[in-house]
Amino acid sequence: MSTASVTTSPTATPTVPRHDHPTPVLGALGLFTVLLGAALPLIDFFIVNVALPTIAHDLAASSAMLELVVAGYGVAYAVLLVLGGRLGDMVGRRRLFMIGMAAFGLTSLACGLAPSAWALVGARVAQGAAAALMMPQVLATVQATTTGPRRARAMSLFGATAGLSMVAGQILGGVLVAADIAGSGWRAIFLVNVPVAIVGLVLAGRFVPETRSEKPAPVDVPGTLLLGLSLVTLLAPLTEGRAAGWPVWTWVSLALFPFAATAFFLTERAADRRGEVPLVPPSLLRLHSLRSGLTLVLPFSIGFGGFMFVIAVALQQGLRMGPVSAGLALVPMAAAFFAASLAGPRLVGKYGSRVVTAGGLIQAVGVVTIAATVWWGWDGLGIAGLAPGTALAGFGQGLQLPVLMRIVLSDVPAERAGVGSGVMTTTQQSALALGVATLGSLFLTLIPSVGMREALAVTLLVQLAAVAVTVLLSLRLPRTVR
């Protein structure tokens, strides 16, 4: 059927998007579907935090093995995200979104049925790879199928979804572990993805329009390998070093990181100058909006990832909360984040990027409140005592993250939507994993010498430094947000 016949056919159903339309439009159900695909990878990065004690008991897993359960997913996800964006530009974003969704459902099933700790680690690595195929197609599809106010609204909803997913992952994890559905225990946190993935596949096939780059570039094999090497040499030793006792390989790996990162940059720059399209084009990084937005996403996500891991450990092991109570303690943060995300577009229209600055200041007040509550009210501390601090922190985060994501992609050309979204999500995911590795290691290292309360307070103050960096850098953002 020709394009002309599609657009003039009297029998075409107006409520169903045409996947071959020259100017595809993402409808409400299509947006819901891709946002579902954005939520799943982030939920599953955090959902295991409150289930780790149960996994350790059932599978006789050591602390090093538990960190591999978290890190294996995070590293595979971060390493392959940019490649996932490039493949979507080539073969079609809806097609790769559906492939990633199907693979995510299958690998989640493998996680839920894992008979041993090593089997769970392997399934988690595969699950992270599947997520990396799916996630970049979300923002690329939004960029390619929306414009103007519709794009601003979609980006705000994406930011809200991202933030809520990270908090909701731990809440949902606690509820599912405690519910022990049909005796499944911790396995339910993975098995629940299977029906969700099936629903996502059905909706994607019907309501998500197909888009691809008009001039897709071939896969940059050297760039892909060097980016993977750079991220692995940094994240693997930081996430595994403390639990493994900092063996020689961790120091060798960290020593290799700057050389791998430099080789990656030089290789990409040379390809760009030859007129090729590298995995991460340096010319794309010259966009002021993308570069300035990524500079803020980095410290924001380091602090966020570290906080979510540390608070899960502190609530369960320090305050002896059960998984449900540990999850419910974050409900005020999730609710406040959602409220701020809804208010964000209107506030940005009036105050521009200063909304990010205000959000950082509010988050700082929230972190200080949590630290003070922990220090002076540790004995008998419960959900109600933590609520004011977590609500303030969540509201501040909700004013920042959606706006930062909107800024990062505001000037990225539609034909490079997949690359741009891959770069942003790689930065965010790498920073989340880095936060777990650095703040998490600091917290766990301090506990034996100073105690749980003091370790948590110190870690919160270190996070406060990351918030301060975000606030200062936000003053350099373009005042107007498109």
Image (spheres, rainbow, N blue to C red):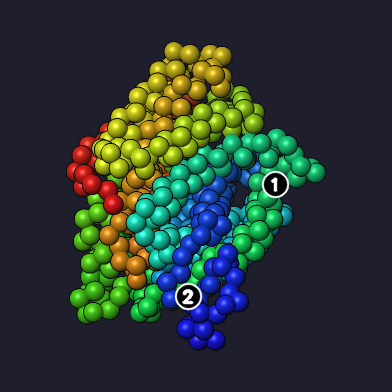
Query: Residue 85: x percent and y percent?
Result: 42, 66
Q: Is residue 191 left or right of residue 378?
A: right
Residue 188 visible here: yes
Instruction: First in sequence, mark 1 or 2: give its number.
Output: 2
Give the crowd class for mark 1: few <14, some 14-19, many >=20 residues within 10 Å.
many
User: Where, by quadrant of the figure, is residue 463 drawn?
Assistant: top left
Who's the residue at 65% across and 50% down the image?
A: 190
In-front residue for pair 220/58:
220
Query: Residue 361: x percent and y percent?
Result: 30, 29
Element class at badge 1: helix
Asked if marks 1 and 2 touch (Cβ < 8 Å), the reply is: no
The number of numbered discs placed on residues in the rendered structure image is 2
276 to 194, vertically: above or below? below
Give the crowd class for mark 2: few <14, some 14-19, many >=20 residues within 10 Å.
some
Q: Which residue is mark 1?
A: 188
Residue 398 visible here: no
Which mark, residue 323? Answer: none
Quote the CA–CA distance across marks 1 and 2. 40 Å
Who's the residue at 51% across and 39% down the image?
A: 167
344 to 457, vertically: above or below? below
Q: Which residue is mark 2?
A: 21
Q: Is residue 17 left or right of residue 227?
A: right
In-front residue for pair 375/256:
375
Query: Residue 364: x percent and y percent?
Result: 34, 28
Location of the N terminus (image quadrant): bottom right
